[in-house]
Amino acid sequence: MTEFPTRLEQALQWVFDPTTFRIQQHAFETRTLLRKVLDELKPERTVELGTWRGGNALLLSLVTSKITISLDIHDYDRNDVINMVRNEGIGLTLPLCDCRSHEVIANTKMCLDGTIDLLFIDDGHCIEEVTADHRLWAPLVRPGGWIVFHDINPEANLLAPGVHPSICQAHAYWQTLTGNKEEIIYKGTPPGPGIGILRMP
């Protein structure tokens, strides 16, 4: 596996700094996804549903050539990422809004000025929310684009931080999907939350 560009590697080190906790993912899973994105997809337009503290959004923006938009209705202390975006000219916007609002979807589509290459779904975790996120946003993803789901590993999600096991059901929705799917899961101890890639036909 070839090395990452310096800026991306520095961002990975910063995001995964254990003293600040900016991302809820195993580093193996994130690095594997980013390598695949760089080598195979090369996205121009990326949308993330569920910003949390902005670490994943920052990384996605560094593998996306034009624009990355990360949407969340809550602010979970994104200030350090916002400051980095402002100071370093990174093509990332982090609006606070409801990603299931039809007005928000229409405005995002207008901002993108094109279809989505990479859609990363990590907002609500109950099955109704994951289902709605997929059904509302999938029509905006171009043929050949990717829809990426977070928290697809049921073993890890029994212990998902801040999420009660009874409503952490992204894995259940993932299992209902058919098509060109790939799973990235760290199987060590503790197991990673997992990433699922659904490649659009």
Image: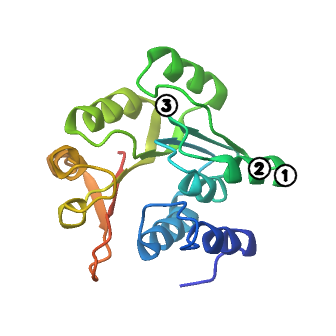
Q: Residue at position x 59%, y 46% from top? A: 77
Residue 73 disc label: 3
Q: Residue at position x 65%, y 70% from top? A: 14
In the picture, measured across the screen, residue 143 lies left or right of residue 76, that is left
Precedes in sequence: disc 3 or disc 2: 3
Q: Which residue is mark 2?
A: 83
Spot occupied by residue 154 in the image (x, y as percentages of width and height) = 18, 61
* Vertical position of residue 175 compared to residue 186: above or below: above
Q: Indicate the amino acid at tag 3.
A: Ile
Precedes in sequence: disc 1 or disc 3: 3
Spot occupied by residue 152 in the image (x, y as percentages of width and height) = 26, 57
In 3D space, how far apart are the residues under numbered discs 2 and 1 (Cα atoms)?
Answer: 6 Å
In 3D space, how far apart are the residues under numbered discs 3 and 2 (Cα atoms)?
Answer: 19 Å
In the picture, measured across the screen, residue 73 lies left or right of residue 155, that is right
Circle 3 — which element? loop
Residue 65 appears in the rendering: no
Estimate how packed mark 3 is, as few (under 14), some (14 to 19) or many (20 or more) residues with alpha carbons within 10 Å. Answer: some
Decide: marks 2, 1 in contact (CB < 8 A)?
Answer: yes
Circle 1 — which element? helix
Q: Residue at position x 55%, y 68% from top? A: 39
Q: Indicate the amino acid at tag 1.
A: Asn
Viewer-proximal residue among 181 and 99: 99
Viewer-proximal residue among 142 and 165: 165
Residue 30 appears in the rendering: yes
Q: Indicate the amino acid at tag 2.
A: Asn
Spot occupied by residue 134 in the image (x, y as percentages of width and height) = 33, 35
